[in-house]
Structure formats: structure tokens, C-alpha cells
């Protein structure tokens, strides 16, 4: 049972006597009083829980709860690496990972996906399988695992690097779908090389009249051409803004022809 | 619009086979009036879909009336005479047990079962298929069953895991109510998988039967303090591959 010990400068200090006994009451206490538990106390409980993870279902449930609170309430992203390690460790043992996976993605931090990508290089095939499953929304990932793992890792790294400014969080999870896409690229913004909000997928600055005009044509394209133009736009913009400005001033038909020709070369 | 073997079909020729106000008639009317092309290789293929959708709705209502409890994966439970409970909280068909008997047991001994909304949908699908296929065919098709949301879904049912925007929404569809501001200590209420049972009414395990406002009202109770966004019904649905299942049925 959680109990209050000596007060310190930060306030009440709480510790778990033993995470394996009375764990049910610890979980109930956590869920009922999470608003009153200070961050440093919750963090301490989490760190203590890690040392005893896997010993009991209730202990792991407590750890999951603490993880979700640290991420969602306290926006603590420093625990993400530990959470990813826990996910993969439990997966190898066939243990419950559903809530931890949800908590991880709720951090809304695309760069943290590299923590999962690291497991593409694992020697354990179960690690690679799970990493592919979690990152399958990225085109560079091959769920069949026929692609070389190191190449998958590198391709994913470059995919994140190229698309980070245009990613937005969808909230999709394994409760909703068998193939969640927690992040989606705002193709229209990528086409215009305008960074978007991770939370809304909308540009931070309103589009100009000219940009809206361009989007009028862009949004009527099929998915294939949208991908073509947005990818080409980003790459040419990265190489030379002058060349990009020249290209984007062409008609949409010419933009497509140029992009097709350049990607063919 | 209904297209059968590349011909636009007038529904008068077969709609009277179905009762007035029935689920099947409701579906026929909707797809007939839709701008979307609903294409089938044969009238039998369409009739199979109608039959299966009708049984999905019945199975959903039956599950609501049963005693299967709502439990998170960590606390899920099943009848161990028929199923092994995995460490993840899923149910694996026991060796030596007939698949049809195990699926039927979920209705017969419903109080021995407890799971969450997504797994409940899979159970509904299996129960509906059991009413449509013969026992022999069902047992031949589904020799291994692992009930745990969309994770270990049988290949024949895998389309049920993909949810996407549709032009129309029909009884028997899986829909999803999303609760973005869910309280993090209640992640099981991050959303609710439901079966569309017609007339703007849905069944979701853990909530029951209600219209969209009623389901949203329940989900909103599980939001974080000072939540800004209400739960809402997504403009998407998942469907079984009715045509593939029909082809198996008629083979």
C-alpha cells in the first residue's frame, strides 16, 4: 500500500513498500489520486516499478498506469526510451503490451519513432517483426521483412528526416484498426514546403492567395500524383529554393512532367 | 447502384423476398439509391452479404442481452474448458475443441467471459458466420481461433481490421467512436468499436445499444479533466470481405 513517509522540501514523499503485495490497492490509489501525486513522486514510482517489472501482472499494470500519466499529464518524454525497451522485452515473452504501445504513441513525438526503429537491427526476429508492425505506416518499412534490416533502418531514418515538418498525429491506435497510422504526412503542406502543426496538420501561417490557387489544382490530383509532386517539391526545395520557385511557377501539368522526368533519371 | 455481372439491377425483382422494415430491405434500399457502384458477380453473392449482415446485427443484439462482461485485456476472462487465456489477455481455441462449440459457448456460458469492445466485434463476426455457414464448413475454415482485437485475426476476416471512409454506412458495418481526450488512466475508453444495427443505432460492448449521442455521452464521462474535445463518430467503417466469404459458401 502506498504510504506517506517523511516530508521533504518538495512535499510529501511516497514510496511503494512492495510492488508485489497490495498491488491492486496501489493501482486503485494511483488511478484515484493521480491529480494530487506530484511529478517527482510519480517519476520515482515509475523508476522503482521498472526494477520489478515482469514479476507480476499487477506490478506491470501499475507501471503502465504510471507511464500513461507521466506521458499524458506531465508530458515526460524522457521515459520513452525505457517504455520502448519495456514493450519489446514484454513482446519477447508474450506479455501484455497494448497499453504501453498506446502510451508511447500518445507522446506525439515523431522523432521518438527512431527508438522503435533501432529494433529493426535486432538479432531477435520477434523484435524486428514488432518494429515493422509499429512502423508499418511509413512506406519505407517492409512488413514482410524481405528487405534488409539495416537498409530498413536507414530508409526509415531518411523518411523521418524528410517528412518530419509535415507530419501530424492522428491518434490512430490498435483498438481502432489493425494497421494504425499514428502519423500522416500533410501532402498539401509538403507540396508547398510549409511546416504544419503536429496536432492539426495545418500550416502555422495561413496560405497566400497564390498558394491556395496551387492547392486548388493539387487537391484534385490522384494520390499517386500528389505523392509525386510533394516528394519532388521537398527534394528540389532542399537543393535550391531558386529552382523550386521556378518549378512551382509552372502549370500543374508541367510540374508533373518535370517531376516524372527527374525521378526517372 | 447495384451492379450484378456488369448489369444495373432493379431491386423490385428480389426486394419482396425480404420483410418490410427488415435489415436486409434497409440495406438494399440504401445501396440501390447510392451513387457508389455496389458490384457483385451474382445475385447470390449479394443475397449472401445481406444474410451475413443480418446475422451480424442479430449476433450483436444477442451479445448485448448476454452476460459477457466488459473487461480490459489484463482482466479478461473466458471459459477454460474451451479456451486458453493468453498472457496478453486473448483467448486461444483449446486443442481438441471444435471451433463451432467454442464460439457457441460464448453465448451459452456468457457470464464466464469478459473482454473489451474490439474482441467483442470479432466474437460477433464468428457467431454470425456460424449461423450462415454449416457447422462442418465453419470448423473446416476456422481451425485456429485467437480472439484478441485485430491482432491475430483470421485471414478470411482480416478486412474487419481495416477501417476507412465509405460513401454509405450499412447495418453490419463496424464503426468507431473516437475519444481523443480520454483520461489516461482509462485507456480502454479511448474509443468504442460498435456494430451498426440500423436506424442510427449501434451496439458497443461495454456500453450497450444506443444512438450516437448516447454512446458519445458515455465516452465523454471518461475524459480527462477540462477536456476540450468530445468523443465523436468517425466517418469510416470496416467490413468483412463478403464476396470472398460468399464464394466459399457457394463453392
Image (cartoon, rainbow, N blue to C red):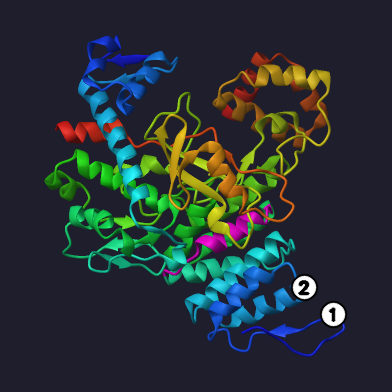
Please, is residue B40 above or below residue B176 in the view? above
Residue A97 inside the magenta-drawn segment = yes
Report, in whole angstroms, how far the alpha carbon at label 2 lies from the one at label 1.
Answer: 9 Å
Instruction: Give the image quarter of residue A45.
Output: bottom right
Q: Chain of mark 1?
A: A
Furthest-right residue in view? A9
Start and end of the magenta stretch? A94-109
Residue A105 shown in magenta: yes
Quadrant (top left, top right, bottom left, bottom right) of the N terminus of chain A: bottom right
In the image, farthest residue toward the left:
B136
Q: Are marks 2 and 1 in contact (CB under 8 Å)?
A: yes
The part of the image, by quadrant, that contains residue A51 is bottom right
Above or below, comparing residue B143 to residue A16 in the picture: above
Horizontal and vertical percent for residue A215? 71, 21
Instruction: Please indicate, yes or no, whether residue B78 appears anywhere in the rendered image.
Output: yes
Among numbered discs 2 and 1, the one appearing first in the sequence? 1
Q: Is residue A33 left or right of residue B8?
A: right
How many residues crowd mark 1 within 10 Å: few (<14), some (14–19), many (20+)? few
Disc 1 element: loop
Residue bearing the label numbered 1: A10
Q: Can the viewer see residue A265 in this picture?
A: no
Residue topped by disc 2:
A38
Please state the horizontal and vertical placement of residue B67, each as a whole percent of the image.
35, 57
Which of the numbered marks, if any, corresponds to residue B74? Answer: none
- Residue B243, quarter of the rendered image: top left
The relative height of residue A207 versus residue B137 in the rendered view (above or below) is above
Q: Chain letter of disc 2? A: A
On the image, the x and y values in percent for residue B2 come to 33, 15
Instruction: Tell me the residue at 73%/67% (across/down).
Output: A35
Q: Secondary structure at mark 2?
A: loop
Quick one: A71 or A242, which is closer to the camera?
A71
Amino acid at each position: 500500500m502506498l504510504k506517506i513517509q517523511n516530508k521533504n522540501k518538495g512535499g510529501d514523499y511516497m514510496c511503494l513498500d512492495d510492488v508485489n503485495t497490495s498491488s491492486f490497492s496501489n493501482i486503485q490509489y494511483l488511478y484515484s489520486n493521480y491529480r494530487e501525486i506530484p511529478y517527482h513522486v510519480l517519476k520515482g514510482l515509475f523508476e522503482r516499478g521498472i526494477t520489478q517489472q515482469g514479476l507480476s501482472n499487477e506490478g506491470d499494470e501499475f507501471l503502465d498506469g504510471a507511464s500513461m500519466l507521466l506521458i499524458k499529464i506531465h508530458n515526460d518524454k524522457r521515459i520513452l526510451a525505457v517504455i520502448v525497451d519495456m514493450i519489446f522485452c514484454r513482446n519477447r515473452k508474450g506479455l501484455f503490451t497494448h497499453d504501453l504501445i498506446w502510451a508511447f504513441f500518445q507522446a506525439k513525438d515523431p522523432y521518438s519513432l527512431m527508438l522503435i526503429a533501432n529494433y529493426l537491427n535486432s538479432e531477435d526476429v520477434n523484435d524486428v517483426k514488432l518494429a515493422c508492425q509499429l512502423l508499418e505506416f511509413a512506406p519505407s518499412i517492409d512488413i514482410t521483412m524481405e528487405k534488409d534490416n539495416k537498409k530498413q533502418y536507414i530508409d526509415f531514418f531518411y523518411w523521418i528526416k524528410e517528412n518530419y515538418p509535415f507530419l501530424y498525429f492522428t491518434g490512430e491506435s490498435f483498438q481502432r484498426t489493425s494497421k494504425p497510422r499514428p502519423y500522416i504526412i500533410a501532402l498539401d503542406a509538403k507540396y508547398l514546403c510549409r511546416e504544419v502543426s503536429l496536432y492539426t496538420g495545418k500550416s502555422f501561417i495561413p496560405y497566400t492567395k497564390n498558394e491556395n490557387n496551387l492547392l486548388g489544382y493539387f487537391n484534385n490530383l490522384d494520390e499517386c500524383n500528389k505523392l509525386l509532386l510533394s516528394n519532388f517539391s521537398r527534394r528540389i526545395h532542399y537543393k535550391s529554393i531558386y529552382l523550386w520557385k521556378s518549378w512551382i511557377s509552372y502549370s500543374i501539368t508541367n510540374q508533373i512532367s518535370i517531376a516524372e522526368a527527374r525521378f526517372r533519371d | 447502384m447495384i451492379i450484378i455481372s456488369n448489369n444495373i439491377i432493379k431491386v423490385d425483382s428480389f426486394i419482396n423476398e425480404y420483410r418490410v422494415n427488415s435489415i436486409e430491405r434497409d440495406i438494399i434500399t440504401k445501396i440501390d439509391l447510392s451513387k457508389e457502384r455496389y458490384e457483385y458477380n451474382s445475385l447470390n453473392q449479394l443475397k449472401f452479404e445481406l444474410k451475413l449482415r443480418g446475422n451480424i446485427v442479430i449476433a450483436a443484439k444477442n451479445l448485448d442481452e448476454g452476460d459477457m462482461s466488459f473487461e480490459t485485456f489484463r482482466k479478461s476472462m473466458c471459459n477454460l474448458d474451451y479456451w486458453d487465456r493468453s498472457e496478453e489477455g486473448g483467448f486461444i481455441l483449446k486443442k481438441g475443441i471444435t471451433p463451432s462449440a467454442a464460439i457457441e459457448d460464448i453465448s451459452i456460458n456468457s457470464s464466464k467471459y469478459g473482454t473489451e469492445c474490439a474482441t467483442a466485434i470479432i466474437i460477433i463476426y464468428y457467431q454470425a458466420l456460424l449461423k450462415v455457414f454449416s457447422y462442418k464448413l465453419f470448423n473446416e475454415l476456422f481451425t485456429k481461433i485467437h480472439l484478441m482485437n485485430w491482432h491475430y485475426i483470421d485471414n478470411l476476416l482480416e478486412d474487419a481490421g481495416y477501417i476507412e471512409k465509405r460513401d454509405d454506412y450499412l447495418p453490419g458495418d463496424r464503426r468507431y467512436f473516437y475519444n481523443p481526450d480520454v483520461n489516461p488512466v482509462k485507456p480502454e475508453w479511448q474509443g468504442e468499436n460498435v456494430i451498426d444495427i440500423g436506424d442510427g443505432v449501434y451496439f458497443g460492448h461495454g456500453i450497450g445499444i444506443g444512438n450516437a449521442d448516447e454512446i458519445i455521452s458515455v465516452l465523454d464521462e471518461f475524459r480527462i479533466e477540462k477536456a476540450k474535445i468530445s468523443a465523436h463518430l468517425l466517418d469510416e467503417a470496416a467490413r468483412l470481405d463478403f464476396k470472398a466469404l460468399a464464394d466459399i459458401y457457394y463453392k
